[in-house]
Image (tube, grey):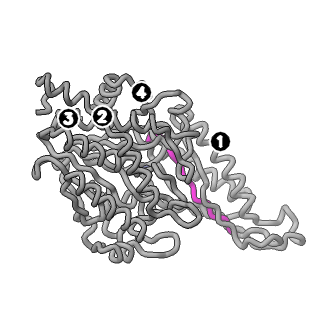
Amino acid sequence: MLHRTNTLVAQRVNGLRVNAARLRADIELLASIGRTSEGALARYAFSPAYEEARAWLKTRMAHAGMAVRDDAAGNTIGRIGPDGGACVMAGSHIDTVPDGGPLDGALGVLAALEVARVIKEAHIELPFAFECVAFIEEEGRFLGRMGSKAMAGVLRQASVEDGMDPSGYRLTEAMRTAGFDPSAATQARRPADDISAYVELHIEQGPVLEQLGVPIGVVEAIVATSHTRITFEGEPDHAGTAPMDLRKDAFTGAAEYACRARELVLKEGTKGQGRLTFGVVDLKPQVANIVPYQVQLLQDIRDVSDAAVAKMVGGTRAIAEDVASKHRLTVRHEHVSGDTAAIMSEHVRAAIHEVAATLGLPTHDMPSGAAHDAQIMARLVPAGMIFVPSAGGRSHRRDERTDWAHLEQGANVFLHTVLRLLADGTVQS
Ligand SMILES: [Zn+2]
């Protein structure tokens, strides 16, 4: 019935819109689950707050007429349309970072739920199923994008066994407490022909769309990332008695390294868009009158090109060796984690462009500097992402916000992208 040659049906489908008030109510309700007494939003994967949100979401999905289940990894999935055969999948995540915002992830899941409701209410007979998914553990309490990795078949059982949050709490224990069997997590894998396409609506989490005044971002690729732990070791000497030229000051070396690495990334990044961040710096012994003998840096490098990331990681390593020898330190490099760049499907991107044009909404093609479940799903199936502007570019904080008008526009582009992908049935690229 969704076939585009059927003009009457096509006109009826083209006129569909999300119920913005209903979507807003869901966003506001979910944002109240996991809210601490200080007003922070803390919904960590498999935590009691998360499980409360999961139970709420499942109720909402069931109320929308979806068949609801949790898979073996802990992803929550609602399905409408035929029981068997391939589906178009849409979603995101409902876990948050510490003191996170109400939209990161939640928007994509709740918009997918709204899409299911619109399809149901319009009594559209789907030729293919539509699935709404809340991927478990996107934000990295334990592993990062755990649920999409499990579904795409790239989650290793050893990672599940080793997974630990910053407080030392084990992923296996968290899963058991939430009622999941950690030894079965990899069984969440889906064959590629189970899913014809994946699409995700997400806030941009950056300032670009707002600055351009464009309501819809079409993601071209999600950047490659590399996380390295770099440890400079020197010697603990007295801050007063040790002459400057005889010290082995690990902090001085680390500081020089950070500045030189920054210069390198500014020079070597694709189109000057490489990114370098030292988000964790651990200095020992943290005593005012002792020369620091050890500094650990957690280095995050990102770029749209895998080759550029590899080149920058190699370049920064050479700088670290040079700095270490200059300051008479030793240095260790430890690869912590990394992801290759994910190119979004041409077909899905074209669908988003066409839909936005039909709705009269300007678009901007852009990379995503943040990691997303879509990046993992792109390994399995054709995937695409739609961005909406983030007010002030702010995200991963409690004042994360997007204008409600922008959310509605994004959700309508998302709705019609899903409808178009459902009409296509299968996607080639
Ligand atoms: Zn997210």
Examine the image and state in which quarter residue 414 appears.
Answer: top left
Density class for disc 1 (Cα within 10 Å; few <14, some 14-19, many ≥20) is few
Question: What residue does disc 2 label?
Answer: 17
User: From this viewpoint, is residue 395 visible?
Assistant: yes
Marks 1 and 4, how far apart at CA = 32 Å
The magenta region covers 294-306
User: Closer to the N terminus: mark 3 or mark 1?
Assistant: 1
Density class for disc 2 (Cα within 10 Å; few <14, some 14-19, many ≥20) is some
Residue 180: % across, % down: 29, 72
Q: Amino acid at mark 1?
A: Glu
Examine the image and state in which quarter residue 354 appears.
Answer: top left
Question: What residue does disc 3 label?
Answer: 428
Q: Is mark 1 within 8 Å of ligand 1?
A: no
> Is 392 displayed left or right of 291 in the figure?
left
Secondary structure of residue under mark 2: loop
Does the residue at mark 3 contact the one at mark 2 (Cβ under 8 Å)?
no
Pair 2/4: label in front:
2
Q: Is mark 3 within 8 Å of ligand 1?
A: no
- Is residue 300 located in the magenta-colored stretch of the structure? yes
Secondary structure of residue under mark 3: loop
Look at the magenta stretch and give its main secondary structure.
strand
Marks 3 and 2, how far apart at CA = 27 Å
Examine the image and state in which quarter residue 250 appears.
Answer: bottom right
Q: Residue at x 25, y 63 (%)?
A: 70
> Is 350 displayed left or right of 304 in the figure?
left
Q: Nearer the viewer, residue 22 or 248?
A: 22
Q: Quadrant of the N terminus?
A: top left
